[in-house]
Image (spheres, helix red, strand yellow):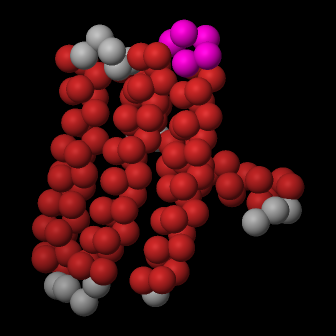
Amino acid sequence: MMIETYDIQKRYCSLAMAVAIVGALIFIAVDAKPIAKGLVLGTLFSIINFIIMAATLPMRLDKSRQKTFMINIGGIGSRYLLLGIPLLIAINMDAVNFFSTAAGLFMVQGVLVGHHFAKLFLGRD
């Protein structure tokens, strides 16, 4: 099961970073470096969040209902704090665009949805 999880993480995280880098290169070409930096920064933290989420998934199994609830609350809270870090960086630094950072935080989810739609409409895997 861990190998399958690792393969899924590798596939989607690599694709998310590739999309972010291509987008960043386009923004750099049109002289929008803060947008490029924000996109890559947000994507990095999105990838870290995705990996942590998968790593903590087995902790929720075979536990009592109350323990599972507390683990879930703690996990969600810590991941929200993690996702707040790039937003704080973007707010405090003029060299990083806030909105592109926020968009980068959704890059892994966007890749997941995009892959699903590509599979649905194009029949590709």
Bounds of the magenta segment: 28-32
- Number of marks: 0
Verify whether residue 29 appears in magenta. yes
Q: In the rendered image, which quarter contains the C terminus?
A: bottom right
Pinpoint residue 21: horizontal percent, then vertical percent: 55, 36
Q: Is residue 29 above or below residue 121?
A: above
- The image quarter containing residue 94 is top left
Say which residue appears at 58% left-offset and 45% top-offset. 18
Pinpoint residue 79: horizontal percent, then vertical percent: 25, 51
- Asked whether residue 48 is in view, the answer is yes
Q: Is residue 63 above or below residue 68?
A: below
Pinpoint residue 96: horizontal percent, then vertical percent: 35, 19
- Decide which of 108, 23 is in the foreground and name it: 23
- Decide which of 9, 56 is in the foreground and name it: 9
Task: Give left or right: position of 34 versus 115.
Answer: left
- Asked whether residue 109 is in view, the answer is no
